[in-house]
């Protein structure tokens, strides 16, 4: 992979990179299409990164379908699909991790303690291998995007990190490989997340700037749906610091994590 990249670099080709954990969907395709528009070469990685999953999380059942991923990448004219093995990414004796402080202790970080350490470590490794000029991430994982931007800035990496809009299904559910876990009834309940975010956005547009009021409205709409098991968090945060705001302003982010049945879904909206 590194020698292929060297050839591209020698011939001054710009490289766009879309890191993924596979089971590609319309959200990933939108990232690939953005990358195609802005770069000479597009590389997609498919690697289910074990070190970003917690002990009781869904690593073993995380959906995989490399054949379909290959077909999709071929259809989208991706130049290279990079699908490394675990033992290549983490050979015996692996000891180095990257931690972005502060930004990783709020929102999802509070409930998934080592998750972002796993994400930044694998993304840094992938960036070192692929040496992308631009890398594309979906805004559904908003905290991930902010954390990766911080890492790139702090470690003087030569990659521009680009956040792309959330792609939603017809019923408003944000595209995610984990949507595969949802039963039909759970799927209906999952649509409550976007409905609640939109409701809060409308209330904000009409003048409501108290985060507690907006959070309560979101909570009560979501809890009306039968398959909602638990709301892990609903937060309204500053888009850069990810700190909860006291008065809601334009540009703030409402982020939430909800268990629909056994499936943990995240979503957010920019005000
Ligand atoms: O967003 C994802 O799919 C993963 O967290 C990423 C960025 C590919 C790292 O494993």
Image (tube, grey):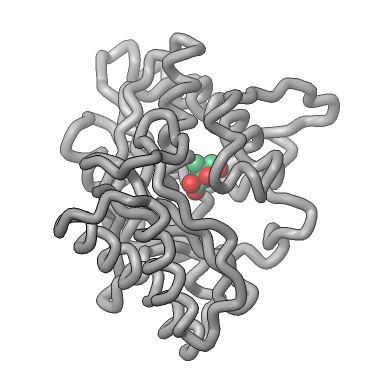
- At x 37%, y 76%, the residue is 191
Up/down of 23 relative to 157, above or below: below
Can the viewer see residue 73 in this picture? no
Numbered marks: total: 0
Question: Where is residue 200 shown, x and y percent of the image?
Answer: 29, 62
- At x 45%, y 19%, the residue is 152
Up/down of 102 relative to 34, above or below: above
Compared across the picture, whether 208 is left or right of 60 comes to left
Question: Where is residue 120 shown, x and y percent of the image?
Answer: 57, 30
Front one among 255 and 89: 255
Front one among 24 and 146: 146
Up/down of 188 relative to 248, above or below: below
Front one among 98 and 36: 98
Compared across the picture, whether 163 is left or right of 115 comes to left
Question: Where is residue 218 shown, x and y percent of the image?
Answer: 39, 67
Question: Where is residue 48 shown, x and y percent of the image?
Answer: 61, 50
Can the viewer see residue 75 in this picture? yes
- At x 20%, y 62%, the residue is 202
Question: Looking at the rendering, which quadrant does residue 145 occupy?
Answer: top left
- At x 35%, y 28%, the residue is 161
């Amino acid at each position: 992979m590194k020698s292929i990249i060297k050839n591209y670099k020698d011939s001054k080709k710009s490289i766009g990179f879309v890191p993924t954990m596979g089971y590609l969907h319309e959200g990933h395709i939108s990232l690939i299409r953005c990358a195609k528009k802005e770069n000479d070469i597009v590389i997609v990685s498919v690697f289910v990164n074990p070190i970003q999953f917690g002990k009781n999380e869904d690593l073993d059942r995380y959906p995989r379908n490399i054949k379909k991923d290959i077909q999709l990448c071929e259809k989208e004219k991706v130049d290279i699909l990079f699908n490394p093995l675990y033992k290549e990414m983490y050979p015996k004796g692996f000891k180095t991790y990257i931690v972005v402080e502060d930004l990783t202790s709020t929102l999802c970080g509070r409930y998934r303690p080592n998750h972002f350490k796993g994400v930044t470590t694998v993304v840094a490794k992938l960036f070192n291998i692929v040496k992308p000029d631009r890398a594309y991430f979906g805004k559904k994982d908003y905290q991930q995007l902010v954390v990766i931007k911080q890492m790139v800035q702090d470690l003087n990496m030569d990659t521009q990190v680009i956040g792309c809009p959330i792609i939603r299904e017809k019923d408003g559910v944000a595209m995610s490989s984990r949507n595969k876990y949802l039963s039909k009834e759970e799927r209906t309940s999952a649509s409550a997340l976007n409905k609640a975010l939109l409701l809060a956005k409308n209330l904000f547009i009409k003048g409501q700037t108290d985060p507690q009021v907006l959070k309560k409205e979101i909570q009560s709409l979501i809890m009306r749906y039968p398959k909602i098991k638990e709301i892990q968090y609903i937060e309204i945060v500053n888009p850069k610091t990810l700190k909860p705001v006291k008065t809601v302003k334009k540009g703030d982010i409402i982020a939430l994590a909800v268990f629909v049945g056994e499936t943990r879904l995240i979503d957010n909206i920019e005000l």
